Image (cartoon, rainbow, N blue to C red):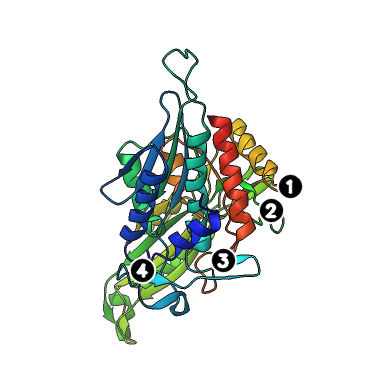
Amino acid sequence: MSSVLELTRELVSIASHEDETAAGDFIEAWLRRETDSDVIRDAVGNVIARTGTGGETLALVGHHDVVEPAPTQLAAGADENTGEATYVLEERDGRLYGRGTADMKGAVAAAMLAFRDAEVDAPSSGPADDTESAGEFAFASFVGEEVGGVGARHAIDEGFAPEYAVVGEGSTGYSSPGVTDVAVAHKGRRGSTITASGERAHASEVGAGTNAIYRATDAVAVVRNLEIPALEVAGERLEGSLTVTEIEGGTAMNVVPDHCELTIDERTVPGERAALERVESIEGVAWTVDQDLPPMRCGDEAFAEAVLEAADAAQSGSPELVTKPHATDAGWLARAGTDCVICGAAEPGEAHTADESVSIEALERCRETYRRVAEGWL
């Protein structure tokens, strides 16, 4: 019986910042060996396993891609058996250090074990059993979460549509240090570009041209005066934000510029969006959306409370329903109609850092939480 620490070690050691194939191979092989579920590997590399039939579906969801490691996180030389790059792993003071420990291979390992154990422990029903099936239980680990939800979007397009999902992104330390909470909403991110066009002229004859930078600054004034949506969720105020992050324009000191671009970072909340389209009321100004990662809000209070109850039973602390500032694959699932909550071992500030780590106790807690959720479902 693998421990969550052992499985996390194995999974984290596999490099997956440029190519998730080897990590997906490991997950797929493990599920085929350790479970009797129906396991598929789709065209983009997602690994999805299902057990049970009929009724609604509950899924444990994660991703096995990671961001590029810091030089100190990448092991010198390749694995002697596979020839693949590997990551440095270090265990100290009750934590496991390495790229992907927090975001989010530790939670994927916990979900794999909970999925296996729930399948083993689930009561069997023979032909003579006329009770209604409890439903389907699924596990999914996606690729491409760090680059816009590539895997989640593909899976959804191919029919992956669980009614409920527990997404194992970080929710530890939100209500109080060391407590693994249950997030019922998170922000999204919309990145966009404002393009201002004008007419070039020599700067000695300002009136002969139209200054694109002036039009762009008029657009900035509009952006700064837009109302930013916010809402109350789980007793917290979830606020969006909107800011200009880059500007580029002009060709020379003595030329009236005919082109200027602004980039906008917008954090969105479920419901309304900031009315950025209003900048197009300015002559010569256009607005385009470059990326739109959707926000998430769980619409089923009973499901959220059931997961909270499982999390409470799995730890000595007192977890709460909270909100999360970061976009995750839960947003894509929620957009497709899945009621999602987020429950995972990572703490704020751990993901994507040069000394990324995860609490081993939190990993055990997540495994137990997922097991309890599955047990209640099956």
Q: Which residue is mark 1?
A: 318
Mark 1 touching mark 2, by CB under 8 A? yes
Q: CA distance from mark 1 to mark 3?
A: 24 Å
Q: Residues within 10 Å of mark 4 (few under 14, many from 20)?
A: many
- Labels 1, 3: front one: 3
Task: Residue at 51%, 37% (x, y): give it.
Answer: 118
- Which of the two labelled residues, at mark 3 and mark 2, occupies the earlier sequence position? 3
Closer to the camera in the image, 249 or 174: 174
The mark that comes first in sequence, 4 or 1, is: 4
Mark 2 sits on what residue?
Answer: 179
Amino acid type of disc 3?
Leu
Q: Secondary structure at mark 3?
A: strand
Crowdedness of circle 3 by 10 Å Cα count: few (<14), some, many (20+)? many
Disc 4/disc 1 C-alpha distance (Å) = 48 Å
Percent of width and height locating residue 180: 65, 51
Between circles 4 and 1, the one closer to the viewer is 1
Tag 4 near tag 1, CB within 8 Å: no
Query: Picture coordinates of residue 278 (x, y %)?
Result: 43, 52
Amino acid type assigned to the residue bearing label 1 in the image:
Ser
| Residue 333 image point, x, y percent | 43, 41
Of the two numbered discs 4 and 2 on the same chain, state the one appearing first in sequence: 2
- Disc 1 or 2, which lies upstream in sequence? 2
> Tag 2: residue type?
Val
Q: Which of the numbered marks, if any, corresponds to residue 96?
A: 3
Q: Which residue is mark 4?
A: 261
Let me know if residue 125 appears in the view.
yes
Q: What's the distance in space between the residues labelled 3 and 2, CA to CA?
A: 17 Å
